[in-house]
Image (cartoon, rainbow, N blue to C red):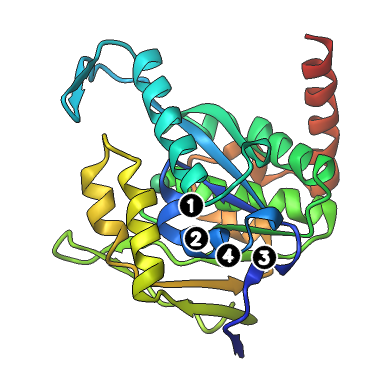
Amino acid sequence: MMITDRTINEKRTLFIGAHCDDIVISSAVTISKKPENSYVITISDGSLDLDVYPIIEAGKIFYTSQEWAKERLKEDLRAMRHLGLDLENYSNFHIKDQRFYENISQIVGGIDHVIREKNIGQLVTHEFPQPHPDHEIACIASHIAAKINDIPVYEYSMYTMDGNGDFFFRSFDDDVSKEIYSHKITSVESVLKLKALKAYETQPFWVEQGMKKMEESFSKVDRDVTVLTDSLPYIEDIKTISPMEVRNILEKYLRGMMQK
Ligand SMILES: [Zn+2]
């Protein structure tokens, strides 16, 4: 396995995160080194379709999922600005948290659209498996969109839970990793990462967890999407679809979007 300390985004790279803050936790320093080559998709708008409102965080009160989503998006954009990202290179897909499984075609379609519109050379996404279904669907959707466009996928290591319910960052699986970019965050870079994480004022827990990850690594992985989805009961609709069929669904979906 080859391990390098070069910057992964020496070519146009699309970073995909399920939720606001996933990309900053995994890739903040990498983006800040080459923001001109970095593109970001946050799939979720952070809102929950559950009876959890009002939410009180950071001294503010949010009565509806719309108010909450607006705040989460504001935080995400603020963090991206700290990293030097041109906001033209940022997209939010406005999917609700924990509702990704109902919107897989839209997610694949959105990623495919950004790849083609921005002429993206490679994707960076969540690793697999993950304790959070949204992270797994983000990973699977990224691999499908990458296959359709014939570009490589890198995965970042994310937190997972140990037997005691404590979070830790796993190292990559030697069996699937082909090539790894790995960078130890310097003290100067950690100041920037903390500043970007602190943009997520309503997420103090994840700020703390994110600062435990003092390395940014990306592992090149070529996954068989059918094998990936075999163990997932929540993904009935893509289990049996080939990449070409996904492309057809997408084209219909995109035509529908353009007619609106
Ligand atoms: Zn997440």
Find residue 26 and report its horizontal and vertical position in percent: 45, 60
- Left/right placement of residue 46 relative to residue 92 reads left
| Picture disc at residue 23 | 1
Badges 4 and 3: C-beta atoms under 8 Å apart? Answer: yes
Q: Amino acid at mark 2?
A: Ser
Badges 1 and 2: C-beta atoms under 8 Å apart? Answer: yes
Which class describes the residues within 10 Å of circle 1: few (<14), some (14-19), or many (20+)?
many
Residue for badge 3: 9
Q: CA distance from mark 2 to mark 3?
A: 10 Å
The residue at the far bottom in this view is 1
Q: Amino acid at mark 3?
A: Asn
Can residue 175 be seen in the rendering of this structure?
yes
Q: Earlier in the sequence, mark 4 or mark 3?
A: 3
Which class describes the residues within 10 Å of circle 3: few (<14), some (14-19), or many (20+)?
many
Q: Which of these two is toward me, 74 or 129?
A: 74
Circle nearer the viewer, 1 or 4: 4
Which class describes the residues within 10 Å of circle 2: few (<14), some (14-19), or many (20+)?
many
| Image quarter (top left, top right, bottom left or bottom right) of the C terminus | top right
Q: CA distance from mark 4 to mark 2?
A: 10 Å
Residue for badge 2: 27
| Image quarter (top left, top right, bottom left or bottom right) of the N terminus | bottom right
Q: Earlier in the sequence, mark 2 or mark 3?
A: 3
Q: Earlier in the sequence, mark 1 or mark 4?
A: 1
Q: Earlier in the sequence, mark 4 or mark 2?
A: 2
- Left/right placement of residue 209 relative to residue 195 reads left
As helix, strand or loop, the secondary structure at mark 1 comes to helix
